[in-house]
């Protein structure tokens, strides 16, 4: 591979951004790269909306009496924060932006298998978002993003059905994305691109797509039954008229647990690419990393009851879910060790994407290890529904997925925009994000073990110190997220041209121009070597 | 620990130390691996930093031996954690044979406790020290969760069902009670205190405030008030099964199955009587759904529990004598 | 490496006008479309599966109510509908075969037959629903409607069903959810059938290219199979001879 020379790189004359102009060419595009950007724009908007609610939550929790807002308002804050962040940011984030943009290029195809369905999935997402915004305008929902019954069906006086419809519709966007990826990866690989030469980013998205396709329909029907119950008052989930509230939890978590793997697996895929490129070395134990993505997807469907250890399950169900939860942690450990081993005898740069990869490694490690705490039922009895759980999942989703997302955005920004971002500002932001993140969420482990429950608008005074630390961290974290918004946008218009391969990385995306042409390649590539085959190609065994 | 910067809640029950020990083990193991990986990453990042713009890493494919090691060791550690966690869980989930039963009803947004001796409390629970206490709970409306952080235990209070938890408090003092399942507007206000007292003080406290009699006595009054006695009686005018001595025993049903007459069955029979009718009787009992509160149901159950065995009950088969009443489902 | 980017002409330099730009060959396009339809049908299985799971659990808990409510369904109409749907799967399979052979008139006729059978199903379903909505007579003389003032399918006036009212209502809501979702899929299917039929009439399908007919056939078979599960589960809970 040849690294582009920053001094002489130029933008290609024609590429996917300028080959067609005008708003219609964007709103009616079938180009996966443009659709990825449409998603990027809308997802970012939802991220900042969800983040705004997070800020309000943390401001409320500065004082034990919760003086900023009433409990009613606070309950809407954490609900809307959760609904927006889970369904409108995290689940689509990496797949719909980076996945859409990169998967065809990485496998040597001209587009996804179904470009029009890809565009449709974005419009469905936007429609779903409008429902979510409508529920916000109508006052916001106060059930928690988990919509537990019978509170959500029979007691809440908020626009539950509107928000539920938003979730229902967003599910179809997710299903169509997953369907598109599965067919694309099966059928559109370039000559020579065998399964075991695929970038691990693609493997991770394949596993994610399996979950999207199999799990999402179940939450769709669950939300629909919830809506029927709320409107018709029939008693599917309401015990006062014969229903079972725990059944709702089973149906809800059957999707929502695999959903967290939808959120983290793409981040792991990004990690593999960042580590390999950052160390200029193939990922250690490629097939183990690839198969561990599949293992996580499959075993991930079997562990949903670990959200319900105190919810009225039998002892034996609890034991089964506990042991399976430990099992699902093993492939993640395997990946972590493989990424670490990739660094050994690598040639490691300290560019921003690599820094984000290091951040992911450390933070995902803490998040994953604390998952083990929660899998031990004897300990989970004390910890469930406390801030310990909140800290655990934020370490994975923010410390993991969001770091990977930012790292990926930085890594592929030159490819997407054709321009380099300012490295100094980027490194600074990565540091600010890392520090802010830990200050926000580490104290929550402690205050959770102390017994502070989740979803509390006010709390006993002895918890205040940790809450103040957490809020201080959140302000720093928020600032750290604003910076990339600014300089990445600036770089889009004014950054130095990047050239085809500013990082000197291996991968089909780096063999085409930055930005790529509309149909990705001048000629359909023919693949002859394994992914990330740096060094002497003949020494790298092709699996 | 500096009192103003607490890191752990007090260990105020027999189980607290066990839970904390498991926690310390997990912290130690996690810290070990976190530090190990962090040090390796930092070491590799420095030792193998890129020294020239064209530098590449060495193409190392992988190592089956290493993969097996770092799959096997985490798996073994995970299984140790599972077994330890399960063992602590068994201890928390298995009700002690002899326990002081206290009933709890959660409702938006308060906890109502009833002692069998008749004391009623709201958001405050007095218990004797060094005595196993079993809290049997339900909810009047939505899901709640009764959480005692200092005892390291919690359980959801589910409407339509009975659930239970137990603890043996070891230290006299006052500790938090929280609701730990989001339940609406005043979820964060649904908190209280558990007051652990020396035995003699607890007895004194029980005898202290005026009550309307024990829970069972209250149940007896309700049994008359709701006219249960018009059908559930010992003479020829009886149209329902006699309830003496039934609690805790197996009961044959009209559909050929049998069921243990526990608190859940009693509750269901009052609210939905035609669901499980005793063999030999017609499904004519009216429903009291909407007329009787959860607390009244508990009082009625206590009353039925307290009825002495007068004679063999038609339709009931005596199970092998239980040492204690069957636990509520 | 840097040669002129692919032009529009380059992309049209392939055999069939039906081949989309991003595919290399027609075979690849057909394989992708077929795999896509199968993956979509798997999502549909999971979608209906959630409802089936809820149904099976409640049936286990509330068998008396489910048995009684099931007896209120019209088994004759349900049985006719089953035969109608199986017949329509036959006609669509024959239509696919005719399309594969390039026989336009046969294809059109069989697609029309499929559509008519599908419409028959929906008409019968309409009558079944209408009875419940307008006034359903129980054997004990009471009349139930779907949305009386007292709430969805309120049976408290029926001596026979009042003791197990909540069980009956849960059955009915699951009945309407399952058959309603199924009917919605039928309606969408007939809509798509309309488009396929129009294409067939215009002569779009040849021996070489008839993928939409095949994919439509797959979808139609799936909708039929769902009904084949629904019918015994809902209508045949506890029928005595």
Image (cartoon, rainbow, N blue to C red):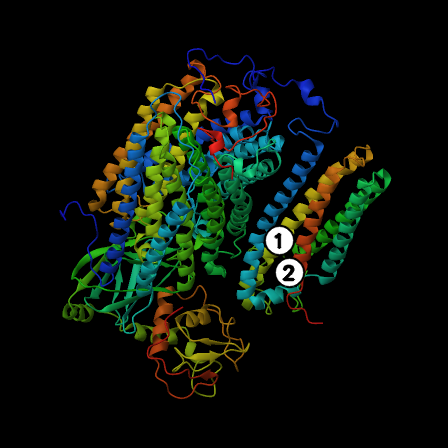
Residue depicted at x 26% and y 36%? A439
Can you give x and y, in whole percent of width and height, for residue A272 in the image? Answer: 43, 35
Looking at the image, which is closer to me, B6 or A96?
A: A96
Chain of residue at mark 1: C
Horizontal side of A103 relative to C140 (left or right) equals left
A413 over B188 or under it: above or below: above
Can you give x and y, in whole percent of width and height, for residue A243 in the image? Answer: 49, 59
- Judging from the image, what secondary structure is the residue with disc 1 in? helix
**Does residue B82 appear in the picture of this structure?**
yes
Looking at the image, which is closer to me, A279 or B262?
A: A279
Can you give x and y, in whole percent of width and height, for residue B147 in the image? Answer: 29, 56
Measured Cα–Cα span from mark 2 to mark 1: 9 Å
Looking at the image, which is closer to me, B204 or A435?
A: A435
Horizontal side of A68 relative to A230 (left or right) equals left
- Judging from the image, what secondary structure is the residue with disc 2 in? helix
Residue A527 tag number: none
Q: Residues within 10 Å of mark 1 (few under 14, many from 20)?
A: many
Can you give x and y, in whole percent of width and height, for residue A54 in the image? Answer: 35, 36
The lab-note entry on whether marks 2 and 1 share a chain reads yes
Residue at label 1? C178
Residue depicted at x 51% and y 42%? A207
A459 over B154 or under it: above or below: above
**Does residue A139 appear in the picture of this structure?**
no
Chain of residue at mark 2: C
Residue at the outermost left position? B2
Q: Residues within 10 Å of mark 2 (few under 14, many from 20)?
A: many
Horizontal side of A316 relative to C77 (left or right) equals left
Residue C234 tag number: 2
Residue at the outermost top position? A8
Q: Could you tell me how many numbered marks the image carries?
A: 2
Q: In terms of sequence position, does the residue under pointer 2 or pointer 1 come before the other?
A: 1
Q: Are marks 2 and 1 in contact (CB under 8 Å)?
A: yes
């Amino acid at each position: 591979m040849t690294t582009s020379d920053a001094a002489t790189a130029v933008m290609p004359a024609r590429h996917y951004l300028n080959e067609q102009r005008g708003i219609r060419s964007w709103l009616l595009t079938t180009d996966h790269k443009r659709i990825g950007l449409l998603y990027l724009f809308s997802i970012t908007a939802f991220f900042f909306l969800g983040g705004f609610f997070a800020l309000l939550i943390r401001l409320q929790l500065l004082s034990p009496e919760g003086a900023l807002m009433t409990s009613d308002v606070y309950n809407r804050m954490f609900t809307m924060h959760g609904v927006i962040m889970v369904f409108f940011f995290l689940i689509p984030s990496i797949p719909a932006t980076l996945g859409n943009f990169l998967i065809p290029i990485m496998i040597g195809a001209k587009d996804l298998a179904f470009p029009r369905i890809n565009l449709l999935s974005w419009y469905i997402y936007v429609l779903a978002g409008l429902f979510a915004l409508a529920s916000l305008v109508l006052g916001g929902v106060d059930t928690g993003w988990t919509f537990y019954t019978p509170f959500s069906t029979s007691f809440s006086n908020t626009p539950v059905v509107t928000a539920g419809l938003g979730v229902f519709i967003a599910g179809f966007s997710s299903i169509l994305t997953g369907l598109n990826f599965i067919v694309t990866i099966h059928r559109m690989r370039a000559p020579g691109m065998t399964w075991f030469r695929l970038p691990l980013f693609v493997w991770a998205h394949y596993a994610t797509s399996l979950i999207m396709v199999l799990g999402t329909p179940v939450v769709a029907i669950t939300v629909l039954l919830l809506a029927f119950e709320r409107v018709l008052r029939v008693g599917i989930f309401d015990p006062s008229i014969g229903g079972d509230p725990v059944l709702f939890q089973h149906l809800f978590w059957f999707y929502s647990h695999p959903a967290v793997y939808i959120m983290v697996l793409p981040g792991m895929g990004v990690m593999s690419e960042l580590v390999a490129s950052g160390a200029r070395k193939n990922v250690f134990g490629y097939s183990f990393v690839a198969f561990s993505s599949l293992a996580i997807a499959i075993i991930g469907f079997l562990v949903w009851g670990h959200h319900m250890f105190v919810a009225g399950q039998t002892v034996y169900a609890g034991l089964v879910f506990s042991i399976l939860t430990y099992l699902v942690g093993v492939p993640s450990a395997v990946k972590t060790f493989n990424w670490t081993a990739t660094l050994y005898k690598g040639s490691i740069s300290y560019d921003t994407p690599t820094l984000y990869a290091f951040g992911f490694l450390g933070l995902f490690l803490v998040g994953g290890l604390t998952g083990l705490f929660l899998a031990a039922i004897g300990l989970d009895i004390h910890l469930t529904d406390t801030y310990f759980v909140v800290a655990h999942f934020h370490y994975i989703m923010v410390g993991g997925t969001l770091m990977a997302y930012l790292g990926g955005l930085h890594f592929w920004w030159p490819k997407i925009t054709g321009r380099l971002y300012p490295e100094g500002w980027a490194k600074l932001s990565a540091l600010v994000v890392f520090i802010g993140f830990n200050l926000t969420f580490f104290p929550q482990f402690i205050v959770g073990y102390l017994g502070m429950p989740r979803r509390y608008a006010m709390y006993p005074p002895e918890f205040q110190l940790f809450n103040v630390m957490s809020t201080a961290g959140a302000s720093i974290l928020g600032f750290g997220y604003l910076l990339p918004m600014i300089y990445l946008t600036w770089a889009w218009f004014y950054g130095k041209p990047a050239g085809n391969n500013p990082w000197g990385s291996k991968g089909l995306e780096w063999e085409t121009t930055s930005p790529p042409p509309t149909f990705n390649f001048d000629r359909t590539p023919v693949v002859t070597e394994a992914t990330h085959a740096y060094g002497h190609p003949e020494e790298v065994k092709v699996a | 620990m500096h009192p103003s910067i607490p890191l752990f809640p007090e260990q105020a029950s027999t189980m607290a130390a066990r839970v904390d020990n498991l926690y310390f083990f997990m912290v130690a193991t996690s810290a070990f691996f976190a530090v190990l990986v962090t040090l390796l990453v930092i070491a590799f990042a420095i030792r193998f930093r890129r020294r020239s713009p064209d530098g590449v890493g060495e193409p190392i494919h992988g190592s089956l031996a290493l993969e097996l090691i770092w799959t096997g060791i985490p798996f073994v550690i995970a299984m140790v954690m599972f077994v330890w966690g399960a063992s602590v869980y068994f201890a928390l989930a298995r009700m002690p044979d002899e326990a002081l039963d206290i009933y709890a009803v959660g409702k938006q947004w308060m906890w109502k406790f009833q002692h069998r001796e008749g004391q009623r409390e709201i958001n405050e629970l007095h218990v004797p020290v060094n005595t196993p206490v079993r809290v049997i709970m339900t909810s009047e409306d939505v899901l709640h969760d009764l959480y005692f952080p200092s005892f390291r235990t919690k359980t959801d209070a589910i409407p339509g069902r009975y659930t239970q938890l137990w603890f043996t408090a070891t230290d006299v003092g006052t500790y938090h009670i929280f609701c730990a399942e989001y339940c609406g507007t005043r979820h964060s206000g649904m908190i209280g205190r558990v007051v652990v007292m020396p035995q003699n003080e607890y007895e004194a406290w029980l005898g202290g405030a005026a009550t309307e009699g024990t829970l069972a006595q209250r149940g007896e009054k309700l049994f008359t008030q709701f006219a249960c006695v018009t059908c559930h009686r010992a003479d020829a005018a009886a149209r329902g099964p006699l309830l003496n001595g039934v609690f805790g025993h197996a009961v044959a049903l009209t559909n050929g199955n049998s069921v243990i007459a526990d608190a859940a069955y009693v509750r269901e029979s009052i609210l939905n009587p035609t669901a499980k009718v005793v063999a030999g009787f017609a499904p004519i009992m009216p429903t009291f759904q909407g007329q009787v509160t959860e607390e009244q149901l508990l009082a009625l159950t206590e009353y039925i529990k307290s009825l002495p065995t007068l004679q063999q009950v038609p339709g009931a088969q005596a199970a092998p004598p239980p040492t204690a009443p069957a636990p509520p489902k | 490496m840097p040669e002129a980017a692919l032009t529009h002409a380059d992309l049209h330099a392939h055999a069939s006008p039906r081949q989309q730009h991003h595919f290399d060959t027609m075979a690849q396009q057909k394989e992708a479309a077929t795999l896509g339809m199968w993956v979509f049908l798997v999502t549909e299985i999971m979608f209906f599966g959630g409802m089936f799971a809820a149904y099976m659990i409640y049936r286990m808990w509330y068998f008396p109510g489910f048995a009684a409510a099931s007896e209120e369904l019209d088994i004759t109409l349900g049985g006719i509908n089953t035969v109608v749907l199986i017949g329509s799967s036959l006609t669509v399979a024959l239509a696919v075969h005719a399309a594969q052979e390039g026989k336009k008139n046969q294809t059109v006729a069989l697609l029309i037959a499929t559509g008519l059978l599908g419409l028959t199903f929906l008409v019968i379903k309409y009558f079944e629903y209408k009875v419940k909505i307008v006034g359903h007579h129980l054997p004990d003389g009471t009349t139930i409607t779907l949305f009386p003032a007292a709430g969805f399918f309120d049976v408290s006036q029926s001596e026979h069903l009042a003791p197990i009212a909540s069980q009956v209502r849960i059955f009915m809501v699951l009945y309407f959810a399952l058959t309603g979702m199924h009917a919605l899929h039928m309606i969408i299917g007939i809509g798509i059938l309309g488009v396929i039929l129009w294409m067939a009439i215009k002569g779009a399908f040849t021996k070489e290219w008839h993928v939409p007919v095949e994919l439509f056939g797959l979808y139609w078979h799936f909708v039929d199979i769902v009904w084949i599960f629904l019918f015994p589960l809902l209508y045949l809970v506890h029928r005595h001879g």
